[in-house]
Amino acid sequence: MLALVNDFFDWLKEFSSDPTFYLIIFSIALLDAVFPVVPSETMVIIGGVAAGAGGAEDGKLFLPLVIAAGACGAFSGDNIAYLIGRSFSERIHRRYDRTEKGRQRLQWAHNQIEQRGGLLLITGRFIPGGRTILTISCGTTEQEHRWFARWIGVASVIWASYAATLGYFGGKAFEDNHTLAFIVAFLTAISITVIIEVIRYIRHNRPR
């Protein structure tokens, strides 16, 4: 497995000078909004690692463009998810109503949107599976699109900056070892997500 990862980053080192890589980051960030199994955060981190190993003048990825590609992809994908929610509201409700877990997830999203508003769209991006549920739910509950787009724009920039910067500093710290740089940045991202989940769980379950 490690050999495969090393081979991938050797390929990445050569491919990172190709502007097509920005399009890949954009596309995967877009798809992740509708298909949560697509690893958009991983791809943005990889872009950050490649940028950290050099600058645009060295034929490498340029950090601001990595952030822009990730943020624009995420913003576009979230708007697609919102439109899906608006267009297929009845079908979505029927799908989630098939199981108790599905009903609870949908109800949770609806309740949270009412209680916490736009800030939830920012924090939800760092909760596994939360992004898709929330963005589609904003559509199914017919939230105002201007309000939605404003908050999603902020969330997309924060998320892309966070993921790309993690990779960037990893790339700077381990310029001669892209694999190690990615592993360190990726594990840091997972750790931060776990911490957010623990804090959220404690706050949700503490005595009122």
Image (spheres, rainbow, N blue to C red):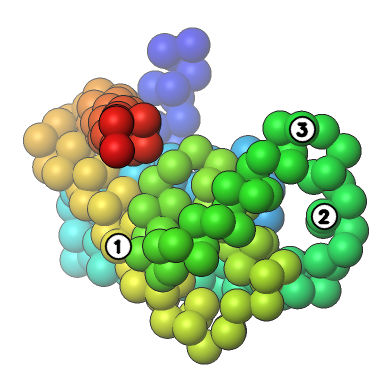
Q: Nearer the viewer, mark 1 or mark 2?
A: 2
Label placed on residue 93: 2
Among the 4 quarters of the image, the one containing residue 62: bottom left
Count residues near mark 1 (Cα–Cα under 10 Å), then give few for <14, some for 14-19, many for 20+.
Answer: some
Q: Name the residue that disc number 3 marks.
A: 100
Q: Amino acid at mark 2?
A: His
In the rendered image, residue 44, in percent from the top left (x then y), is placed at: 39, 50
Q: Nearer the viewer, mark 1 or mark 3?
A: 3
Secondary structure of residue under mark 3: helix
Among the 4 quarters of the image, the one containing residue 201: top left
35 on left or right of 171: right
Frontmost residue, 187 versus 146: 146
Label placed on residue 158: 1
Question: Label 1 to label 3, Cα distance in Å?
Answer: 33 Å
Frontmost residue, 109 versus 56: 109
Callouts 3 and 2 close, C-beta under 8 Å: no
Question: Label 3 to label 2, Cα distance in Å?
Answer: 12 Å
In the rendered image, residue 164, in percent from the top left (x then y), is placed at: 29, 52
Name the N-terminal-most of marks 1 and 3. 3
In the rendered image, residue 81, in percent from the top left (x then y), is placed at: 67, 65
Name the N-terminal-most of marks 3 and 2. 2
Q: Using the rendered image of the protein, determine whether residue 107 is visible from the camera's viewpoint.
A: yes
